[in-house]
Structures are given as structure tokens and as C-alpha cells.
Image (tube, rainbow, N blue to C red):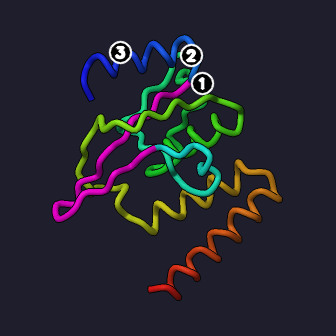
């Protein structure tokens, strides 16, 4: 993204009082790349905000971030803010490229933390729907492979 687009994005976010500006991030696996564009409406279901390319309004960032989870603390923060009505500005322009690996690439641990966060934060009926849809999605994916 060029400097002028970046500057304009921050100006739009400030005028419209967005709490988050999320640009597209690219995850580099070494043999392929995956484009990650924020989808705030999917936060109850999955970690859909690419944190390496997301900026947070200072007043928003001060409150509510916890280090309780080793992998999914960013997800917990974004989900809590989404539920409480924070506004997300999504810009489909690549800002970051990052390598895949490290602690967060442990899929099982990551999914377990996400489930724990969902169970703790989402109201009972919403958690039931989210967990049911997740199970159905996995079964459909397995059938279609």
C-alpha cells in the first residue's frame, strides 16, 4: 500500500470514529501464500482479523487486552470488542507479509483456545449455534474432500 492510501485510510477512520483499521495481510507458507482480509462479522465463529495488519485506536487498545491465552489473546480482544459494538474499517490492500510458523501454528492448541474463548464470551444460545455450525462445517468439509 502506498503512503497516500495509508494516510487517507487513517483520516477516514478518524472522521468516522472507527476503533480498528484492518488491512490485508499475506501469510507466507514458503511454498504458497494465503491472502487474509478481515471479516469482522465472522468473529463469533473464527479468528477472522489478521492482527499483523490491524491498527487499533489508542482509547480502544487501553482497555480489555488480556494475556490469558498463549495463542488466541488477540482473538479474545477482537471478539470482546466486536460484541461490544466496536467499529472495524476493512481495507483490502496488502500491508504485511508474514511467515507461517511458531506457537500460533499449533492448530489443535489454537482451536482449543478459540473454543474456550467462545464458550466464555458468547451468550449460551449463541455459543451453542457457533459450536454446532463449526461441527457441521468440519463434517461437510470432510465429506467433500
Where disc 1 sits, the SS reads loop
- Residue for point 75% across, 64% down: 129
- Residue for point 62% across, 69% down: 134
- Nearer the observer, 62 or 24: 24
Q: Which residue lies furthest to the left in this view?
A: 30
Q: Give the range drawn in magenta.
A: 19-37
Magenta-colored stretch includes residue 23: yes
The relative height of residue 62 versus residue 103 in the rendered view (above or below) is above
Q: Do the residues labelled 2 and 1 touch (CB within 8 Å)?
A: yes
Crowdedness of circle 2 by 10 Å Cα count: few (<14), some, many (20+)? few
Left or right of residue 134, residue 32 in this image: left
Query: Whole-percent x and y of residue 50?
Result: 42, 43
Cα gap from disc 3 to disc 1, whole angstroms: 25 Å
Q: Is the magenta stretch mostly helix, strand or loop?
A: strand
Query: Whole-percent x and y of residue 29?
Result: 23, 60
Of discs 3 and 1, which sits in the foreground?
Answer: 3
Where disc 3 sits, the SS reads helix
- Nearer the observer, 62 or 144: 144
Q: Name the residue under label 1.
A: 63
Q: Are marks 3 and 2 in contact (CB under 8 Å)?
A: no
Of discs 3 and 2, which sits in the foreground?
Answer: 3
Q: Quadrant of the N terminus?
A: top left
Q: Which mark is residue 127?
A: none
Mark 3 and mark 1 lie on one chain; the one further toward the N terminus is 3
Query: Whole-percent x and y of residue 145?
Result: 44, 86
The number of callouts visible is 3
Q: Name the residue under label 3.
A: 7
- Nearer the observer, 96 or 6: 6
Q: Mark 2 points at which residue?
A: 59
Magenta-colored stretch includes residue 115: no
Amino acid at each position: 500500500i502506498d503512503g497516500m492510501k495509508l494516510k487517507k485510510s487513517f483520516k477516514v477512520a478518524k472522521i468516522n470514529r472507527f476503533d480498528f483499521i484492518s488491512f490485508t495481510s499475506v501469510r507466507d507458507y514458503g511454498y504458497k501464500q494465503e491472502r487474509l482480509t478481515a471479516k469482522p462479522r465472522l468473529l463469533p465463529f473464527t479468528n477472522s482479523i489478521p492482527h499483523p495488519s490491524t491498527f487499533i485506536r489508542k482509547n480502544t487498545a487501553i482497555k480489555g487486552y488480556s494475556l490469558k491465552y498463549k495463542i488466541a489473546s488477540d482473538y479474545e480482544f477482537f471478539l470482546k470488542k466486536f460484541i461490544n459494538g466496536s467499529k472495524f474499517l476493512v481495507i483490502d490492500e496488502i500491508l504485511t507479509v508474514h511467515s507461517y510458523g511458531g506457537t500460533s501454528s499449533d492448530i489443535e492448541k489454537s482451536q482449543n483456545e478459540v473454543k474456550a474463548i467462545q464458550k466464555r464470551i458468547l451468550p449460551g444460545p449463541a455459543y451453542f449455534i457457533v459450536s454446532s455450525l463449526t461441527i457441521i462445517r468440519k463434517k461437510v468439509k470432510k465429506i467433500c474432500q
